[in-house]
Image: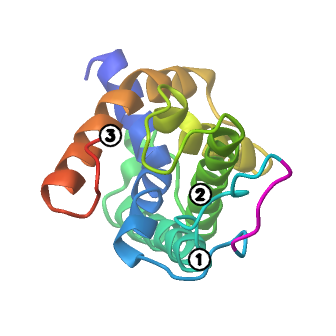
């Protein structure tokens, strides 16, 4: 197998729990905002009503379940021969939480720049969850630099496509 293709597969295998955890809060439509509806000193919401405890918990658990499924596949099909990282439920939880932490941080930054909920903030919108997943997960496992480059290159296209599909399915109000 081509080395570059294998590297892309390895990178995407590893980040999959974060990729699946990130959109989970949209499906859950939580009602309990993490910031409790409080405002920052600039008068804008700290995070906004779209960032909920249900979404944070549900996305984190989803990341764990994806990690569990990947772990079962890894053992069942001897995926170590392809250099794929052995995934566990715990690592999936860390990746899922990291993705949502990054999304929360992205929301915090957007509110400071007076960007309203649903408005575009290029680059940050596409990469905040990857940055968060990397940051939190780097405390428990070394992550290959090549993987980070792959995520930064492919994530914007995947993110735009997933958001457009969610918009068409009426899960999101905007296609970005």
Residue 47 is inside the magenta segment: no
Q: In 3D space, how far apart are the residues under numbered discs 3 and 1 (Cα atoms)?
A: 24 Å
64 to the left or right of 138: left
Residue 57, position as x, y percentages in the image: 59, 77
Q: Earlier in the sequence, mark 1 or mark 2?
A: 1
* Disc 3 to disc 1: CB gap under 8 Å: no
Give the magenta-colored segment's residue range. 37-41
The one nearer the camera, 133 or 51, is 51
Q: Quadrant of the N terminus?
A: top left
Q: Which mark is residue 57?
A: 1
Q: Give above or below for 18 relative to 159.
A: below
Q: Earlier in the sequence, mark 3 or mark 2?
A: 2
Structural crowding at the residue carrying mark 2, measured as other residues with C-alpha within 10 Å and reported as few (<14), some (14–19) or many (≥20): many
* Disc 1 to disc 2: CB gap under 8 Å: no
Q: How many marks?
A: 3
Residue that numbered label 3 is attached to: 176
* SS for callout 2: helix
* SS for callout 3: loop
Q: Which mark is residue 67?
A: none
Residue 25, position as x, y percentages in the image: 45, 68
Residue 61, position as x, y percentages in the image: 53, 76
Q: Give above or below for 125 relative to 36.
A: above
Q: Which mark is residue 100?
A: 2
From the image, give the main secondary structure of the stretch colored magenta: loop
């Amino acid at each position: 197998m081509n080395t570059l293709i294998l590297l892309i597969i390895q990178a995407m295998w590893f980040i999959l729990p974060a990729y699946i955890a990130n959109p989970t809060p949209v499906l859950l439509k939580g009602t309990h905002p993490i910031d409790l509806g409080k405002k920052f000193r600039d008068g804008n919401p700290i995070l906004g009503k779209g960032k909920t405890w249900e979404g944070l918990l549900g996305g984190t658990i989803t990341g764990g379940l994806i990690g569990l499924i990947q772990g079962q596949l890894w053992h069942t099909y001897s995926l170590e021969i392809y250099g794929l990282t052995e995934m566990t439920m715990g690592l999936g939880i860390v990746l899922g939480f990291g993705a949502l932490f990054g999304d929360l941080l992205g929301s915090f930054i957007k509110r400071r720049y007076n960007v309203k909920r649903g408005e575009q903030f290029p680059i940050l919108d596409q990469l905040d969850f990857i940055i968060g997943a990397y940051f939190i997960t780097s405390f428990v496992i070394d992550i290959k630099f090549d993987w980070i480059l792959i995520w930064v290159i492919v994530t914007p296209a995947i993110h735009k496509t997933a958001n457009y599909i969610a918009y068409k399915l009426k899960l999101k109000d905007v296609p970005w």
